[in-house]
Image (cartoon, helix red, strand yellow):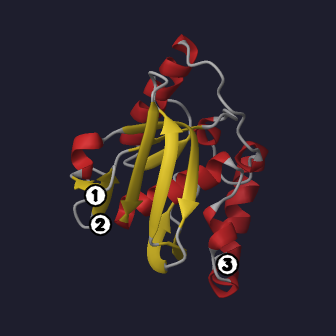
Amino acid sequence: MIREIVLYGDPVLRTKGKQIEKIDDEIRALAADMLETMYEANGVGLAAQQIGQTLQLTVIDVSDAETHPSQMWLAGEEVDPKEHMPLILINPEVQIEEDQEIGTEGCLSFPEITAEISRSAKVRVTAKDLQGNPVEFEAAGLLGRAVQHETDHLNGILFIDRMSSATKAALAGKLKRLAAEAKK
Ligand SMILES: [Zn+2]
């Protein structure tokens, strides 16, 4: 079922997600809805907060982003990210590396806004999948960026918090209008 995507200004986006203790039918149904909602909106990632759920759950699929390559490693071996999509990450934890790189980001909760954001160039991710099995991988490129963007959401952090003050100032008018829309 396609869910409504929560827009900037809704306090749920600022709420840290709760750890998921039990992966039951409700969680599986929620993950399926999140995938459907993300694909319908042409997004590469969606966090539970974006459909109004404060849980540590996010879905990611970078398969169709041909112009923004991704890299992925499993147990140190480079793999084709497409063969591992979509990712459904439960209670994910991300270790970032020092090297930063700047890239363009958008967010389904901020329609029509994109900005240059500095992120760690490579990350190591640990999480659980829908079967409760441990998931561990490293990611770079778009996938690395998506993982950082989505796990930020799970902690109530938004990409505007990662923008330079100059970028944020340039977008101030648009952000104000979005927040005002959300309050209606
Ligand atoms: Zn987002």
Q: Are marks 1 and 2 in contact (CB under 8 Å)?
A: yes
Q: Which sits earlier in the primary sequence, circle 2 or circle 3? A: 2
Looking at the rendered structure, the secondary structure element under dot 3 is helix
Mark 2 nearby-residue class (10 Å; few <14, some 14–19, many ≥20): few
Mark 3 nearby-residue class (10 Å; few <14, some 14–19, many ≥20): some
Residue 125 in view (yes/no)? yes
Tell me the distance, in whole angstroms, between the alpha carbons under discs 1 and 3.
26 Å
Nearer the observer, 46 or 85: 85
With 129 as the anchor, is 98 left or right in this view? right
Q: Residue at x 28, y 58 (%)?
A: 65
With 17 as the anchor, is 2 left or right in this view? left
In the rendered image, which residue does mark 2 sit on? 68
Position of the N terminus, as image quadrant, is top left
Spot occupied by residue 77 in the image (x, y as percentages of width and height)? 26, 54
Looking at the rendered structure, the secondary structure element under dot 2 is loop
Spot occupied by residue 178 in the image (x, y as percentages of width and height)? 67, 59
Q: Amino acid at mark 1?
A: Ala
Nearer the observer, 35 or 41: 35
Q: Any atom of ligand 1 within 8 Å of the CB at mark 2?
A: no
Q: Which mark is residue 168?
A: 3
With 63 as the anchor, is 163 left or right in this view? right
Q: Residue at x 70, y 53 (%)?
A: 181
Q: Which mark is residue 65?
A: 1
Tell me the distance, in whole angstroms, between the alpha carbons under discs 1 and 2.
5 Å
Q: Which sits earlier in the primary sequence, circle 1 or circle 3? A: 1
Residue furthest toward the top?
Answer: 25
Q: Amino acid at mark 3?
A: Lys
Q: Amino acid at mark 2?
A: His
Q: Any atom of ligand 1 within 8 Å of the CB at mark 3?
A: no
